[in-house]
Structure formats: C-alpha cells, structure tokens
Amino acid sequence: MARHFSETEVIATLEGLDPARLHAFVAAHVVSPVVTPQGHAFSEADLARLQLLCDLSEVYDLPDDSLAMVMSLIDQLNTARGDMRALIQAVATEPDEVRGRIQKTVRRLRVVTLSRDD
C-alpha cells in the first residue's frame, strides 16, 4: 500500500512550502490530495508535484493560474510519453515486415511535416 503524508509532514519535508502555499496549491487544483477524517493526505507523487510547484513559483514567480497551466502541460507530456512507450513496445512485437513498413511511413510523415513547417 502506498504511503500517505499528512499536511504537517508535507510542510516539514518540502523546502519553501508553508501552510498557506499548500492550501493555495490545493485550492488551485494543481495537486489533488486524498481527503481523510484527519485532513488531506498526500502521496509520494503529490510530494514530487508540490516540490516542482514550489520550485516553479519561486524561480519564475508564476501565479496560481499559470502554475495550473504549466502542470497541465507537464501532465499531458507525461501521458504522451507513456503512450509513446506503449506504442514502441507494441510495434516491437510485430514482424520485421510490419516494423519496416511502419518505419518507412513514419519517415515519410516526418518529411511531410517538416516541409509544412518551412
């Protein structure tokens, strides 16, 4: 079972995070803790996300709505990377002939896409 951290533990663990900032991140829906009878509970992934949020807000001085947009883009990129990994694994299971056709098609499409960008 995954470990969860209380608000107090999260604030003590993450540099640059105070109760007001944590509550602002939760209110902005850029982190979604589990709600328990004891309060919010944060996963290890939430901690990593909160650290990134603290770093982004300190380095770039981004407001909460901009942080939400940046995190949404990061989430989309991570989803696309996962999809790409799965696609690569699926293609790897195909026969050589099929993989060869896919490679040729990808190269052709990349050339078409690059020529459109010019």
Image: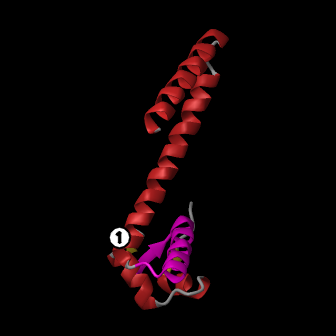
Under tag 1, what secondary structure? Answer: loop
Residue 19 part of the magenta segment? no
111 left or right, relative to 30? right
Residue that protrudes farthest toward the top in the picture: 97
The residue under label 1 is which amino acid type? His
Above or below: residue 117 compared with residue 109: below
Which residue is farthest right?
96
Q: Is residue 108 visible?
A: yes
Q: Residues within 10 Å of mark 1 (few under 14, many from 20)?
A: some
Q: Residue at 54% across / 65% down in the picture? A: 45
Which residue is pictured at 41% across the width and 77% down the height?
40
Residue at the (48%, 27%) spot, across then down: 112
Q: Which residue is mark 1?
A: 29
Depth check, front residue: 64 or 2: 64
- Residue 63: x and y in percent read 38, 79
Q: Which residues are magenta?
A: 37-62
Q: Nearer the viewer, residue 23 or 117?
A: 117
Give how far across and how far down residue 44 sits, in percent: 57, 68
Percent position of residue 28, x then y: 34, 74
Residue 66 versus residue 8 in the image, above or below: above
Q: Mark yes or no: residue 34 visible.
A: no
Task: Pick the residue in front: 2 or 22.
Answer: 22
20 relative to 94, above or below: below
